Image (cartoon, rainbow, N blue to C red):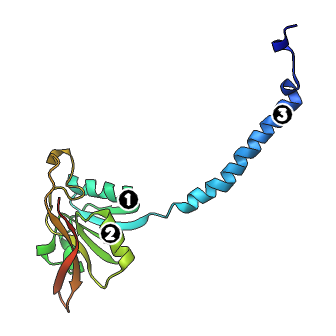
């Protein structure tokens, strides 16, 4: 009998069973210690409600970016003019979609990081807006735009009194 073919204690059914149980125990211990921790480390998605035109591709792109950034979107394909007016945002600050998150209005192609900043700072404000549809802003930055990045500001929108009186100041500036 060749030495390499001799049965060893490692080949015994008892040893193989013990090794299998050890591996199962190790796997179970790993799942118990890292599984719940990994789940607990994942924050719950932040709900955001969005009103947009049903045919607007850039709105869909912005929503996809928001969801990648940890938001969970409820989308209304009914346009956004009525909700923007109801929330008190003047037309001059409008864009192609309007969102509500934690009681704040988010108008247009606002970067997800600025929405997070708004939610962390909790300013006394109506919300934030990127008026118009600047190329290079989130959702307006796909291959069709050839890498172009226009300058744009995210504006903090502050109600100044009853009705639709608002003032703005730069919340974040993007310079290309």
The disc, 1 or 2, on the residue closer to the chain's N-terminal end is 1
Give the spatial CA distance, label 1 vs label 2: 10 Å
Residue that mark 3 sits on: 17
Residue 72 horizontal side relative to residue 136, left or right: right
Give me the residue at 49% from left, 64% from top: 43
Give the spatial CA distance, label 3 vs label 2: 55 Å
Quadrant in the picture for the C terminus: bottom left
Instruction: Return the residue found at the far bottom.
Output: 161
Numbered disc 1: secondary structure: loop
Q: Residues within 10 Å of mark 1 (few under 14, many from 20)?
A: some
161, above or below 102, in the image? below
Give me the residue at 62% from left, 54% from top: 35
- Contact? badges 1 and 2 (CB < 8 Å): yes
Numbered disc 2: secondary structure: helix
Residue that mark 1 sits on: 69
Residue 17 horizontal side relative to residue 108, left or right: right
Residue that mark 2 sits on: 115
x and y, in percent, of residue 163 in the image: 18, 89
Nearer-the-camera pick, 25 or 108: 25
Q: Answer whether residue 56 is visible to the viewer in this image.
A: no
Quadrant in the picture for the N terminus: top right
């Amino acid at each position: 009998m060749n030495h390499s073919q001799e049965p060893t204690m490692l080949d015994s059914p008892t040893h193989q069973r013990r090794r299998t149980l050890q591996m199962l125990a190790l796997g179970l211990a790993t799942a118990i210690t890292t599984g719940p921790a990994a789940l607990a480390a994942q924050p719950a998605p932040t709900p955001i409600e969005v009103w947009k035109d049903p045919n607007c591709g850039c709105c869909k792109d912005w929503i996809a970016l928001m969801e990648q950034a940890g938001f969970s979107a409820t989308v209304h394909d009914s346009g956004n003019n009525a909700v923007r007016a109801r929330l008190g945002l003047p037309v001059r600050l409008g864009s192609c979609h309007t969102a509500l998150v934690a009681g704040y209005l988010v108008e247009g192609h606002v970067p997800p990081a600025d929405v997070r900043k708004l939610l962390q700072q909790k300013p006394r404000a109506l919300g934030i807006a990127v008026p118009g549809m600047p190329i290079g802003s989130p959702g307006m930055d796909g291959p069709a735009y050839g890498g172009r990045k226009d300058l744009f500001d995210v504006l903090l929108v502050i109600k100044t009194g009853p009705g639709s009186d608002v003032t703005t100041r730069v919340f974040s500036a993007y310079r290309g």
